[in-house]
Amino acid sequence: MTAAILSQTRVVTRGGAILGLAVELSGAWGAYDMQGRALTAKRFDTSDDVLAWFDTRAAERE
């Protein structure tokens, strides 16, 4: 069994659409979909870093 401390969660939206979640687990931030699956293996220092990652990902899709 794996355990982690969930500290904070932010819902990431753009234009009213939910893109995913920025979640702090055990001191590191990650990007997750609404089902709790990791969208990247990268870990981020701040929630703002996760938001920037979502923005970059959205821009690549446009």
Image (tube, rainbow, N blue to C red):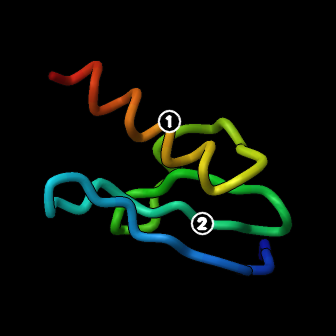
Residue 32 point in image, percent of width and height: 47, 56
Label 2 CA crowd tier, 10 Å (few <14, some 14–19, many 20+): many
Q: Dots 1 and 2: beta carbons under 8 Å?
A: no
Look at 24% across and 62% down and name the residue there. Answer: 18
Q: Is residue 11 above or below residue 45?
A: below
Q: Give left or right: position of 33 versus 28.
A: left
Q: Is residue 23 above or below residue 46?
A: below
Disc 1 designates what residue?
Answer: 53
Q: Amino acid at mark 1?
A: Trp
Q: Which residue is mark 2?
A: 23
Q: Is residue 29 left or right of residue 38?
A: right
Q: Nearer the viewer, residue 20 or 40?
A: 20
Q: Secondary structure at mark 2?
A: strand
Answer with mark 1 or mark 2, whichever residue precedes in sequence: 2
Disc 2 marks which amino acid?
Val
Q: Distance of mark 1 from mark 2, alpha carbons?
A: 13 Å
Tell me if residue 38 comes above or below residue 9 in the rendering. above
Query: Split into 4 quadrants, where in the image is the C terminus?
Result: top left
The structure residue drawn at horizontal position 54% and vertical position 38%, both measured from the top left corner, is: 40
Q: Helix, strand, or loop for circle 1?
A: helix
Which residue is painted at 45% across and 66% down in the image?
A: 36
Task: Report the residue at 16% width, 59% height from top.
Answer: 17
Q: Where is 21 relative to 30, above or below?
A: below
